[in-house]
Amino acid sequence: MTTQVLGEEPSPEERGEATVSHFETIGRYRVLQELGQGGMGIVHLALDERGRAVAVKVLRPHVAHDEDARSRLAREVDTLARVRSDRIAPVFDADLEGDRPYIVTRYVPGPSLDQLVRDEGPLDPQALLSLARGLVDALRAIHRVGVIHRDLKPGNVLMLDGAPVVIDFGIAHVAESSRMTMTGLVMGTPGYLSPELVEGGDVTAATDWWGWAATLVFAATGRPPFGRGGMEAVLARVARGEADLRDVDPGLAPLLYACFDPDQSRRPDADEVLTALDAWANGRPVTEVLPQRTRTLEQGATQVVTPAPAPVEPPSPWGQGDWRDPNPRPAPVSAPPQANQQWPGMAAGDPDRPGDPRIGRPRRSDVLAALLAVLVAIFAAAPWVGMALALVWSWLARTVDLSMTSTVRRRHRSGRRRSDGVVAALASPWHLLTGALQALVSALLPLAVGAAGVLVTALGQSALDGLGVRLESPLPLAVGALLALLVGWWGPGGPGLRRGSRSLARSVTGIPVVRLVVIAVLVVIAVGVLGALFAGALDITWWPGTLSPLPGPEQLPTR
C-alpha cells in the first residue's frame, strides 16, 4: 500500500499569501505576533478585550473555504471542549463560519519540547520523568472522555515551568470513529506515527502510547525515534517497531520498547505505563511490572514480535539498526547571541522587531495584593486621601501602559531605533493627559459601586447591632473601598490599569529582597491602620474637609 504523509507546507511568503500583520484584529482579538505555523493554520499571540494573552489559530487563506479543513477545525473545538486537564490547553472561543475561521485557546508562555531540546539538549532523568508523568496525565484525561489525540509529538508539547501542556487536536477523533477514512493518506509527522496510522488501520488509545514513547525518545536523546533518511526507510522502521533507543536510560528502554510494539494489542495501557514509570523512578527494573505480552529484544538479531514466556529485561545496547542518514544535511550554524535577542516575547526570526516585553514577565500579584490592602486601610481611615491615592496610581499606571504599548507598536512597524527613547519622552505629555482622562472616566463606575457597597454594608451592620446606620464606621468604608478597587481593576478600562500596575510593581521590586521588604512594609501598614480603626484607637478623618460629607445617624430619617 502506498502511503503519503502530509507534513509542513511552504510558508505563506513562498505561496504568495498575505499574512496577518501585527496589531490587526482577528474577530475581537488584537494580534501581537506570530507563534508558529503548520500546514493548515497559523497560530498568533493575541490579546482579548480584557487584555489577557491568548493563542489564536487561524486557517490559512488557501484552505479557509475548504469544508474538510473547517470540519477538522470544528473537530478540534469539539475535542477540546470534552477534555478538562491542566495538561491540556483549553479552548475559549471559536468562529467556524467566518471568512477567516479561527479558534482561541489558552496561551502557554513556554517553548515547544522540540525547541527546548534543540536549544538546551536532551532532558536529564528528573526532567524526563516529569515530562513522562505529565504526558501520562494528559493522555489519561484525553482517553477518559473517549478521545484519541493521534498526533502526539515534540512539536505538539509545550513546556511550562518543566511541565508539559499538550496542544493541537486537529486530527484527534472520538474513539468510536477513529478509523482512517482516506486509505493511503495520513496526517502527521513521519517517525511519530504508529503503524496503524501509516497503514490505515483501527486507531485506539494504544496509538497515543506509541506517540508518548516516541516523544520521550526524542526528549532523552535529541534524535528522532526512528532515525533519519528517506521517508520509505523511516516508515519501514516504524512498521517493524525498530526504534533508536541508543542513549536512552537502560532502565527506561524496556518500557519504551514495549510501547513500540507494531501489534497495538501488546502495548501497555495507561495503568501499566504509570506503574512502570514509578518502578523506574524508584530504581526497580521496569520488566518486573511490564505485562507478559511485552516483546523481548535479541541483541544483533531481527526484532521478533512474539509473546515472552516471562518478563525478561532486554540486553543493552538498545537499537541495532543503521541509523545513519544517507543524505545528511549540514548542521545549522548558530549565530552568536545578541543582547536584544534575550528580550521576553521576542518575535521569532526577527530580533529587530521584538514582541511585547510585558508578556511572560512576573505578574507581581503578591505586591499588588499588599498594595490593595493598604489602599483599603487608608480609605477606611481617611476616605478622601484613599480616593486621591487610588486615582493617582490609576493615572500613573495607565500612563506607563500607554507609553510602553506605543513603543512596542512602533518597534513592530519600524524595528528598534536609537530615537525610541526620545520619541517616548516627546509623547509623554500626551500619554499623561490621556492617562488622566482614562483614570477619571474609568473611576465613575467603581465610585458608584463603592458608594453602594458602603450603604448596603452600613444597613446590614445596623440590622445586626441595632446601633443605627453608621456610614462613617470603618467596616462599611473598608467594604466600599474594596468593591470600588476590584471593579476598577477588573471592570471597563481594567486591562490598561493591570498592565501598567504590574510594570510599575516590577520596576520597583525587581530585586527579590526588595520585593519581600516592600510586601512586609505594606502588610504592616494595612494591618496597623485597620487594627487601630476597629479598636477605636484611630478616628476617621475626612481630609481635606473637617466635617463628614455623609449624613450622620441623627440626620437620617427614622421612618
Image (cartoon, rainbow, N blue to C red):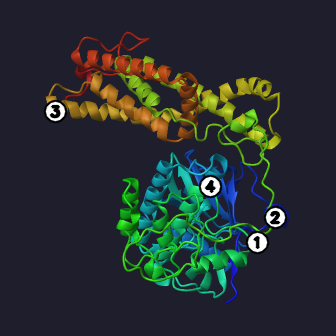
Question: As drawn, which residue projects farthest toward the left?
Answer: 466
In the image, 188 versus 76, the foreground residue is: 188
**Up-down relation of residue 397 to residue 37 (above or below):** above
Q: Position of residue 51 (x, y in %)?
A: 57, 44
Q: Closer to the N terminus: mark 3 or mark 2?
A: 2
Under mark 2, the amino acid is Glu
Q: Do the residues labelled 1 and 2 touch (CB within 8 Å)?
A: yes
Q: State how far apart marks 1 and 4 are (Cα).
A: 22 Å
Q: Closer to the N terminus: mark 1 or mark 2?
A: 2
Q: What crowding class fits label 3: few (fewer than 14 Cα within 10 Å), some (14-19), or many (20 or more)?
A: few
Residue 87 visible in this rendered orientation of the protein: no
Q: State how far apart marks 3 and 2 are (Cα).
A: 69 Å
Give me the disc on residue 62.
1
Q: State how far apart marks 1 and 2 are (Cα).
A: 8 Å
Q: State how far apart marks 4 and 3 are (Cα).
A: 47 Å
Q: Nearer the viewer, mark 1 or mark 4?
A: 1
User: Disc 2 marks which residue?
Assistant: 17
Q: Closer to the N terminus: mark 4 or mark 2?
A: 2
User: Disc 4 marks which residue?
Assistant: 28
Under mark 3, the amino acid is Leu
Q: What crowding class fits label 1: few (fewer than 14 Cα within 10 Å), some (14-19), or many (20 or more)?
A: few
Q: Closer to the N terminus: mark 4 or mark 3?
A: 4
Residue 101 visible in this rendered orientation of the protein: yes
Q: In which quarter of the image is the N terminus?
A: bottom right
Q: Position of residue 200 (x, y in %)?
A: 59, 85
Q: Quadrant of the C terminus?
A: top left
Q: Which of marks 4 and 3 is in front?
A: 4
Q: Nearer the viewer, mark 4 or mark 2?
A: 2
Give me the disc on residue 527.
none
Q: Position of residue 152 (x, y in %)?
A: 55, 67
Q: Which of marks 3 and 2 is in front?
A: 2
Under mark 4, the amino acid is Arg
